[in-house]
Image (cartoon, rainbow, N blue to C red):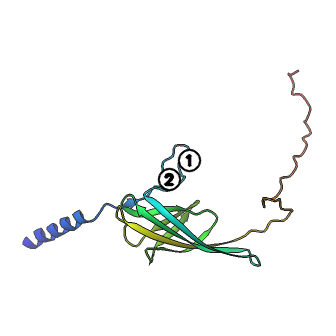
Amino acid sequence: MREAVAALAVAVGLAGCAPGFAPGAAGIGDPYFPTAGNGGYDVAGYDLDLRYDPSTGVLSGAATITATATRALSRFHLDLAALTASTVTVDGAAAGHSAQGGELVVTPPDGLERGRRFTTVVTYSVRRVRRTGTRTAAGSAPRRAPTRSASRGRRARGTR
């Protein structure tokens, strides 16, 4: 009986010490752009190291993000569209990651306590898709001219 009470006391004591970690929000809550930004942390700075090889069309790089958790985080989101993350670390330790739409969901090996400053490094790459046709100065393919409709210029029945 004493052993059971002692085990229960230890379990309650440990539970009281563990912060309540929760996922960060996918957006910052803007009513017009609900998925813009990411909740649960405040970014202090970004450092980008980019490389582009014109012969292969591959863009690769590493983004180093320094931030502070504004709540106890079990995972957090980063905006990452059209790129494939190959490795993610949080404070130098390998972190779980998965792509969900234009978001990269990062799960650090340990929860991040509120107020903790942390550094995330994401390495990524993408291969440029080559399109046929002439490029415009902005780099996008030109729009096709609209086609004429057979009903163009005719009035619908019952109208003047």
Proximity of marks 1 and 2: CB atoms separated by less than 8 Å: yes
Horizontally, residue 154 falls left or right of residue 57, namely: right
* Rendering coords of residue 59 (x, y %): 67, 73
Snapshot quadrant of residue 108? bottom left
Horizontally, residue 5 falls left or right of residue 113, namely: left
**105, 90: nearer the viewer:** 90
- Asked which secondary structure carries label 2, the reply is loop
Horizontally, residue 59 falls left or right of residue 93, namely: right
Indicate which disc, 1 or 2, sits on the residue closer to the N terminus. 2
Q: What residue is shown at x 39% (from left), y 64% (from top)?
A: 74
Q: Which residue is mark 1?
A: 33
Q: Residues within 10 Å of mark 2 (few under 14, many from 20)?
A: some
Number of numbered discs: 2
Q: As displayed, is residue 63 above or below residue 159?
A: below
Q: Residues within 10 Å of mark 1 (few under 14, many from 20)?
A: few
Q: Farthest residue in the left direction?
A: 2
**65, 109: nearer the viewer:** 65
- Asked which secondary structure carries label 1, the reply is loop
Mark 2: amino acid:
Gly
Residue 70: assigned label? none
Horizontally, residue 4 falls left or right of residue 152, namely: left
* Rendering coords of residue 113 (x, y %): 34, 64
Q: What residue is shown at x 83% (from left), y 56% (from top)?
A: 142
What quarter of the picture does the C terminus occupy?
top right
Q: What residue is shown at x 89% (from left), y 46% (from top)?
A: 147
**118, 149: nearer the viewer:** 118
Mark 1: amino acid:
Phe
What quarter of the picture does the N terminus occupy?
bottom left
* Rendering coords of residue 126 (x, y %): 66, 71
* Rendering coords of residue 67 (x, y %): 45, 64
Q: Which residue is mark 2?
A: 27
Q: For the residues marked 1 and 2, what is the alpha-carbon distance in whole angstroms? A: 8 Å
